[in-house]
């Protein structure tokens, strides 16, 4: 960690000279004015915390450094330590990459038509279908369906407008995607960055329900797209579908981590059908171990043994299609 | 006169309480927004060519706090696990545990804030992060982000 960063951070709000000057100002106050000053004090403290750039110490560069240090820190507002638990689900892009590597073919008929977006009027319908369209967008990007990628990004924009976060996917972003439509890596970057920003905004705005429903929609669409033609699937794809039992577990943990709402409960009930179908996929947990490969890469091997049969996968495909079509109708 | 004075005092107390409440709400929202900026500026670039997972696993933590992330890593894929915290929190440490709770990796005594690895078989793992305790008179809180990128 650079010494310069540490020094700047530690010095914030510790300017003794300023403290002394403030005390002298308070000593001179008339009693009648002290209440107004007291009320203004928190505001003053909020904006006065931080170290001003020293003159002759790099000017603009120093100011920029201070701005960077001020991001993401402030005096603690609580004293008692706690444990924060996160639950993560694979992003739609990760799922689409898995499908592509498993040899699946792009099936345009499997996508949720974009003209249906206008019919999703409730917050819950918009949130779940934003996830579903994110799955379709990712699938289109990974399979180099350039025009479809831009179309689905535009559809996500429409739903974001409805959810009050339309500024995340603005005209500039659409133009950037359009200009990079031939470059898959750029589109992947744009999509992951956009949905990261959306998740962050939902957190900032206290929209946990929307965040949970969107994650569920993305997960459902990923498995739905992967199970459209199971009879012609290879063993790799079948294994990938069976392994989603673990990500379903992550998804249910994520939904449970949010304050319960009617729509989240409804989603959990719907997902319990999928969970029941996954009961026929057996996972035996084994110890994992990290070893160094010849090229120096650390490889984590061992871990779970996943067992399933075609009937179990057919049940999963059926239950996922049911829930997907329920929400996408 | 007395009634007027009492009313003024009540109004002042109410104003102060309302103002304090607003300040708490404002600073909580502001902290979240700051964390997003911090993560994008300071953490995201450290994923380099790994494709980021779009989950927002960022929290405002204080010395002594812990954070845990549970997720599934897919087989035959390379990952970078990045634990990125504001420098005011000191050197964060983290461990990676398998689904049975056995330790696979421990960052203690290592210089790096990330762990690059490849997973042979798909598996659920837990990442456990510790913020070191502090003896400082004024403790600071800072953003901690657990980021996962993948490639190949």
Image: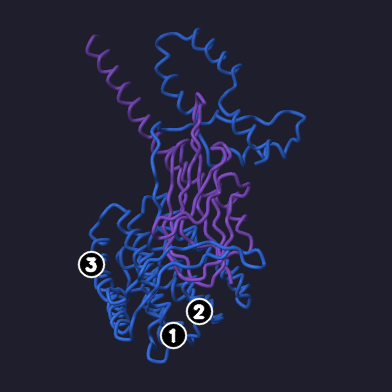
Chain colours: A blue, B purple
Residue drawn 40% across the image and 60% down it: B99
The tag earlier along the polypeptide, 1 or 3, is 1
On what subunit does the disc labeled 3 rest?
A
Vertical placement of B35 versus A328: above or below? above
Neighbour class for label 2 at 10 Å: few (<14), some, many (≥20)? many
**Viewer-nearest of labels 3 and 2?**
3
Residue A117 lies, in percent from the top left, at: 37, 74
Give residue A140's mark: 2
On what subunit does the disc labeled 1 rest?
A
- Are labels 1 and 3 on one chain? yes
Name the side, left or right, on which A172 lies relative to A210.
right
Vertical placement of A74 versus B46: above or below? above
| Distance from Cα at disc 3 to Cα at disc 2 | 30 Å
Residue drawn 37% across the image and 62% down it: A250
Give residue A235's mark: 1
Q: Please give the residue where the numbered disc 3 appears in the rendered image.
A: A269
Residue A289 lies, in percent from the top left, at: 50, 62
Q: Classify mark 2: helix, strand or loop.
A: helix
Pointers 2 and 1 in contact (C-beta within 8 Å):
no
On what subunit does the disc labeled 2 rest?
A
| Distance from Cα at disc 2 to Cα at disc 1 | 23 Å
The tag earlier along the polypeptide, 2 or 1, is 2
In the rendered image, which quarter contains the N terminus of chain A? top right
Q: Classify mark 3: helix, strand or loop.
A: helix
Residue A32 visible, this angle? yes
């Amino acid at each position: 960690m650079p010494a310069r960063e540490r020094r700047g951070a530690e010095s914030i709000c510790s300017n003794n000279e300023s403290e002394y000057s403030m005390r002298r100002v308070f000593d001179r106050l008339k009693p009648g004015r002290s209440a107004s000053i007291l009320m203004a004090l928190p505001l003053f403290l909020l904006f006065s915390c931080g170290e001003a750039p020293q003159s002759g110490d790099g000017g603009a560069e120093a100011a920029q450094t201070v701005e960077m240090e001020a991001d993401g820190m402030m005096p603690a507002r609580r004293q008692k330590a706690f444990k924060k638990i996160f639950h993560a689900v694979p992003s739609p892009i990760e799922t689409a990459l898995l499908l592509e590597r498993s040899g699946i073919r792009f099936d345009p008929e499997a996508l949720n038509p974009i003209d249906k977006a206008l019919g999703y009027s409730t917050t819950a319908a918009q949130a779940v279908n934003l996830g579903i369209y994110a799955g379709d967008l990712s699938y289109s990007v990974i399979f180099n369906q350039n025009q479809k990628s831009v179309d689905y990004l535009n559809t996500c924009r429409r739903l974001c407008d409805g959810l009050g976060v339309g500024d995340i996917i603005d005209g500039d972003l659409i133009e950037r995607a359009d200009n990079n439509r031939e470059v898959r890596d750029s589109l992947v970057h744009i999509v992951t960055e956009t949905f990261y920003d959306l998740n962050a905004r939902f957190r900032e705005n206290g929209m946990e329900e929307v965040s949970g429903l969107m994650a569920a929609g993305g997960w459902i669409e990923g498995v739905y797209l992967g199970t459209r033609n199971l009879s012609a699937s290879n063993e790799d794809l079948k294994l990938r579908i069976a392994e989603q039992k673990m990500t379903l577990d992550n998804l249910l943990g994520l939904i449970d981590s949010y304050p319960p709402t009617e729509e989240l409960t409804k989603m959990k009930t719907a997902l319990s059908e999928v969970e029941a179908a996954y009961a026929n996929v057996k996972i035996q947990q084994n110890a994992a171990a990290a070893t160094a490969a010849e090229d120096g890469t650390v490889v984590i091997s061992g871990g779970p043994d996943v067992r399933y049969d075609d009937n179990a996968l057919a049940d999963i495909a059926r239950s996922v299609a049911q829930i997907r079509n329920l929400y996408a109708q | 006169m007395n009634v007027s004075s009492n009313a003024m005092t009540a109004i002042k107390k109410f104003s102060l309480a309302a103002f304090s409440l607003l300040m708490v709400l404002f600073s909580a929202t502001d902290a979240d927004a700051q964390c997003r900026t911090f993560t994008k500026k300071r953490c995201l670039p450290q994923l380099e060519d790994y494709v980021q997972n779009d989950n927002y696993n960022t929290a405002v933590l204080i010395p002594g706090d812990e954070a845990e992330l549970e997720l599934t890593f897919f087989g035959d894929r390379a990952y970078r696990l990045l634990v990125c915290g504001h420098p005011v929190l000191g050197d964060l440490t983290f461990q990676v545990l398998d689904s049975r709770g056995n330790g696979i990796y421990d960052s203690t005594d290592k210089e790096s804030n990330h762990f690059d690895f490849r997973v042979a078989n798909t598996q659920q793992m837990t990442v456990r992060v510790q913020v070191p305790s502090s003896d400082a008179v004024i403790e600071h809180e800072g953003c901690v982000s657990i980021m996962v990128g993948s490639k190949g």
